[in-house]
Image: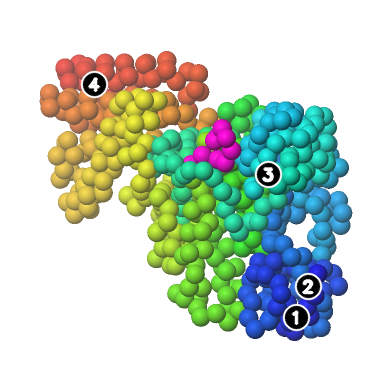
């Protein structure tokens, strides 16, 4: 064991001498309390250590011990429904061991060492296995079955395989390697967090991650295996958007990282998720969720590790063939931790004090997302979608973290404080946001929703862009200076904005909208607009057209329960046709 001595303490940064034989990113224990830390710089035999706990009281001369291993996470049964801190210590386990206040230096294993899991083998003695192959399964929750995989760099013949109840450290399989040695496999494996888990092939994402949020699914969709950013100022609804995505996204596993945000937001997640029923499984949402919490009052240095801890756990489930959605709230707080440690290391600062390597670190994180073929003979297809919230000071997206993120991600959901103050939520600005997956996903929408869906979306976006131009004219000459067709266009855009893009996250029905319901609502709005244009051509009065009662029916359609959507759509479509036909024929009465 390599042993050094503390010569400098600067907040979470500790410098130790006598560590010349240690390696970069080795985990160390510092001082009498054995505070956990990680070597982040080696210079002239001195090791700069990032300590993940409060360093108050630490003094020069204290001993430092290297574990000889990098910061790693434990992967196996017990991950789901657990809440961890930034370095994968279970918060509930720490509370049982030390009470409500976390004791410094506490060491609680990430996975319960006493709980037994029912292991069902899927291989037999004599089978040839390689890294990534599944040797058995464990039913972790009602909706998640963990597939126990052969660890990386292990391949050979199954010498022994067991069935029954085991803890995560007991041997369930013995594999004879090519060199004749026996390798014992358990339900658990470890992986260093700073290195992405390997895979066979990375594929092009071509399936949307359906979220149930109309402005996202219709206007700015994200693909399974895609990356997205949600930047916005304080109070614009970043956290609620992240919560909505975590609740309703079409993913089998959700990993939610609360990185540097307020503790009450994580409390909301913990209180709300167990009570919410997953629309895909009928079970509690917590049955497929892993939570990483490193809130604003927890050690700054651990924020940096929390992002890597979360994405490594997500990659583990991706390798099983699951679709995984990872939410990071927020990467700005993670970047602030980078900035603080960079300053203490006396590195040359970049723009606004952030380190020069900010962009490359962000890229290393987001590039670990993707749709892949996993290792193993059968090659399972899994997807990891990464969605990061960005909190630019004052909502200024020209700052370094936002700009570095936008160079990497392919979906940009721009939250607008003006919309938020107008109580329009989700406050995603339809003129500034974009998705580079739209063209690639059009085929899926046409085949699985409706052949007209891509065209309807394009028409709606075109109308919204034209509305922005018309509004400039209205400010100059007033609405009466517009032609009746342009005035109808403004009315249609108002319906798109208020009836379609506006969605109530706290309404029992409106919180989630299926793709079929989204198509039906957009179709009703477009029907009203197109048939209204024809009526105006036939001499109908604009005031009568805009005052038709059917507009109220269209607005209320989004509150229709899913089982009644088809019937309600047919009814409103008939009312639109009949009322506008009567109007164009001059038979409509004054309302």
Give the residue pinned by disc 3: 178
What kind of colouring is applied to the model shown? rainbow
| Any part of residue 564 in sight | yes
Say which element carries label 3. loop
Report the Cα–Cα distance between label 1 and label 2.
8 Å
Task: Looking at the picture, tell me which residue is in the foreground, 465 or 50.
Answer: 50
Q: CA distance from mark 1 to mark 4?
A: 85 Å
Q: Residue furthest front?
A: 179
Say which element carries label 4.
helix
Q: Which residues are magenta?
A: 371-380
| Residue indicated by mark 1 | 18
The residue closer to the viewer here, 338 or 3, is 3
Please identify the quadrant where the C terminus is shown: top left
Percent across and percent down for residue 303 are 63, 62
Q: Is residue 459 rendered to the left or right of residue 97?
A: left
Relative horizontal placement of residue 447, taking residue 29 as reference (left or right): left
Name the dominant secondary structure of the magenta segment.
Answer: loop
Q: Is residue 247 magenta?
A: no
Q: Which residue is mark 2?
A: 2
Q: Are marks 1 and 2 in contact (CB under 8 Å)?
A: yes
Residue at 47% over, 24% down: 560
**How many marks can you see?**
4
Please tell me which residue is depicted at 66% across the width and 56% down the height of the picture: 192
Mark 3–mark 2 Cα distance, whole angstroms, equals 33 Å
Sequence order check, earlier mark of 4 and 3? 3
Mark whose residue sits in front, 4 or 2: 2
């Amino acid at each position: 064991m390599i042993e050094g001595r503390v010569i400098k303490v600067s907040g979470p940064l500790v410098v130790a001498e006598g560590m010349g034989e240690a390696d970069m990113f080795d985990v160390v224990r510092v001082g009498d309390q054995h505070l956990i830390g990680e070597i982040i710089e080696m210079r002239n035999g001195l090791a700069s250590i990032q300590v993940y706990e409060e360093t108050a009281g630490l003094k020069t001369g204290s001993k430092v011990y290297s574990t000889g291993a990098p910061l790693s996470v434990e992967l196996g049964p017990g991950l789901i429904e657990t809440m961890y801190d930034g370095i994968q210590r279970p918060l509930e386990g720490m509370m049982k061991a030390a009470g409500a206040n976390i004791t410094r230096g506490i060491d609680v294993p990430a996975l319960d060492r006493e709980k037994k899991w029912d292991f069902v083998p899927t291989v037999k003695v004599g089978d040839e296995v390689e890294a990534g192959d599944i040797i058995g399964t464990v039913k972790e929750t009602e909706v998640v079955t963990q597939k126990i995989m052969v660890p990386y760099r292990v391949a050979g013949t199954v010498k022994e395989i067991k069935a029954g109840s085991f803890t995560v450290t007991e041997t369930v399989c013995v594999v004879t390697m090519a060199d004749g040695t026996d390798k014992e496999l358990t339900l658990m494996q470890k992986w260093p967090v700073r290195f992405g888990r390997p895979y066979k092939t990375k594929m092009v994402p071509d399936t949307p991650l359906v979220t149930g949020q109309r402005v996202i699914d219709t206007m700015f969709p994200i693909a399974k295996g895609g990356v997205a950013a949600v930047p916005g100022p304080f109070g614009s609804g970043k956290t609620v958007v992240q919560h909505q995505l975590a609740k309703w996204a079409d993913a089998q596993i959700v990993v939610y990282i609360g990185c540097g945000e307020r503790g009450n937001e994580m409390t909301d997640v913990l209180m709300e998720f167990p009570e919410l029923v997953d629309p895909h499984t009928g079970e509690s949402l917590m049955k497929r969720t892993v939570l990483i919490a490193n809130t604003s009052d927890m050690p700054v240095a651990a924020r940096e590790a929390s992002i890597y801890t979360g994405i490594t756990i997500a990659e583990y489930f991706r390798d099983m063939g699951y679709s995984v959605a990872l939410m990071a709230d927020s990467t700005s707080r993670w970047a602030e931790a980078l900035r603080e440690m960079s300053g203490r290391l006396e590195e040359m600062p970049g723009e606004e004090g952030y380190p020069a390597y900010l962009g490359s670190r962000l890229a290393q994180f987001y590039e670990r997302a993707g749709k892949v073929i996993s290792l193993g003979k059968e090659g399972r297809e899994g997807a990891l979608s990464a969605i990061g919230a960005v909190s630019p000071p004052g909502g200024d997206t020209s700052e370094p973290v936002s700009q570095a993120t936008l160079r990497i991600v392919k979906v940009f959901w721009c939250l607008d404080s003006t919309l938020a103050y107008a109580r329009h939520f989700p406050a995603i600005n339809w003129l500034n946001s974009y998705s580079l997956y739209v063209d690639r996903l059009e085929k899926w929408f046409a085949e699985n929703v409706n052949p007209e869906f891509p065209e309807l979306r394009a028409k709606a976006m075109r109308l919204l862009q034209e509305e922005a131009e018309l509004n400039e004219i209205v400010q100059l000459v007033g609405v009466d200076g517009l032609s009746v067709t342009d005035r109808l266009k403004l009315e249609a855009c108002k319906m798109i904005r208020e009836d379609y893009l506006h969605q109530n996250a706290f309404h029992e029905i409106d919180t989630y909208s299926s793709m079929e319901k989204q198509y039906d609502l957009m179709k009703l709005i477009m029907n009203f607009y197109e048939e209204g244009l024809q009526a105006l051509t036939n001499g109908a009065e604009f005031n009568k057209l805009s005052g038709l009662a059917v507009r109220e029916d269209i607005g209320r359609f989004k509150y229709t329960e899913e089982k009644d959507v088809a019937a309600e759509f047919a009814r409103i479509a008939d009312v639109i046709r009949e009322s506008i036909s009567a109007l164009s024929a001059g038979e409509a009465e004054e309302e």
